[in-house]
Image (cartoon, helix red, strand yellow):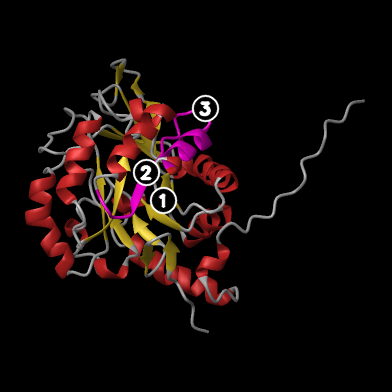
Amino acid sequence: MSVDLSVRLGRLVLKNPIATASGTFGYGLEFAEFLPLGKLGGISVKGLSLRPCFGNPPPRICETDAGMLNAIGLQNVGVEAFLSEKLPELERLGATVIANVWGDMEDDYVAVVERIGGDRRVAAIELNVSCPNVVKGGLIFGNNPTALGALVRRVRGATPLPLIVKLSPNVTDITATAKASVDNGADILSLINTLVGLSIDIETRQPRIGFTTGGLSGPAIRPVAVRMVWEVRKALPKVPIFGIGGIESVEHVVEFLIAGADAVQVGTANFRDPTISARLVDDLARWCEAHGIRRVADLTGTLKTRPRPEHRFG
């Protein structure tokens, strides 16, 4: 049986639902010796700023139980170097490129997006409005629906490309920021970004991360991510979603799809196995064939929930 792995997220059409998450796959070129970049549904590159950024001082990463804590600080080469040095090679290798962008203020985001404009080599733009390990920006937008809506509205006017907003899990109600994003022009949502965490060296009594806190990712956050994808799917049933958080196997991919994601982004697992994203494409095709699924898109949003029982008292 031939399986159709293609998925449509609004105007963004991907050959399969396996993409890589920003900050975990470099600019894609670093992984070209391990897997064919053109095989993946998409690559969300390291967050791009208007000028090169050196990031946070070390230590910037540490392993945690079932996950990883990082405070890289969005180190990147800047949008100009990306467009002139990275993007031509990505195009040559057949990669579907999602340009992740960030800034400290609204004007910074807009300037980066305007520089990318409608570049045909870029499939979509993803706004990082939710990074928990930079001093400014990030959480200011990601945690405030009003500020987020204003930012998305301005960026929407700066590019004709499909616009993705990457949501923060560090909120009381993720559907509020999801709705604010969509109401102001977002075409697609990606969720979740990392959770704020702290790890301490008990011998020195100092944080294991130089920034003190960092973003927690990996398998430990997957149930949280799946739950939030499900919540957003219920609140916004027609909005395309990338599911992100602790994906390490084809079963995890399918879990996100059933919860309501149209596609997924693989993140922390790339550090342990640089070939995993390509293998998941093949694994997904085999899983669908074994389960009689002809179109992977048919899995999206098929969760069968049970009625919640009322409290019983003696």
Badge 3 amino acid = Thr
Q: Are marks 2 and 3 in contact (CB under 8 Å)?
A: no
> Does the stretch in magenta take in 117?
no
Point out the frontmost of discs 1 and 3: 1
Q: Which residue is mark 3?
A: 172
Circle 3: element type = loop
Counting other residues with Cα less than 10 Å from the Cα at mark 3, is it few (<14), some (14-19), or many (20 or more)? few
- In the image, which residues are magenta? 159-181
In the rendered view, does 72 fall on the left or right side of 171? left
Say which label, 1 or 3, has the lower sequence index. Answer: 3
Q: Residue at x 55, y 47 (%)?
A: 236
Where residue 202 sits, quadrant-wise, is: top left
* 2 or 3: tag closer to the N-terminus: 2
Place of residue 75 in the rendered image (x, y in percent of width and height, measured from the top left): 17, 38
**Label 2: few (<14), some or many (≥20) within 10 Å?**
many
**Label drawn at residue 165:** 2
Q: Amino acid at mark 1?
A: Ile
Q: Which residue is mark 1?
A: 188
Q: Secondary structure at mark 2?
A: strand
Position above or below: 218 against 53: below
Local packing at callout 1 (Cα closer than 10 Å; few below 14, some 14-19, many 20+) is: many
| Mark 2 or 3, closer to the camera | 2
Q: Residue 9 in the image: x percent, y percent?
A: 43, 59
Give the Cα separation between the discs numbered 2 and 1: 7 Å
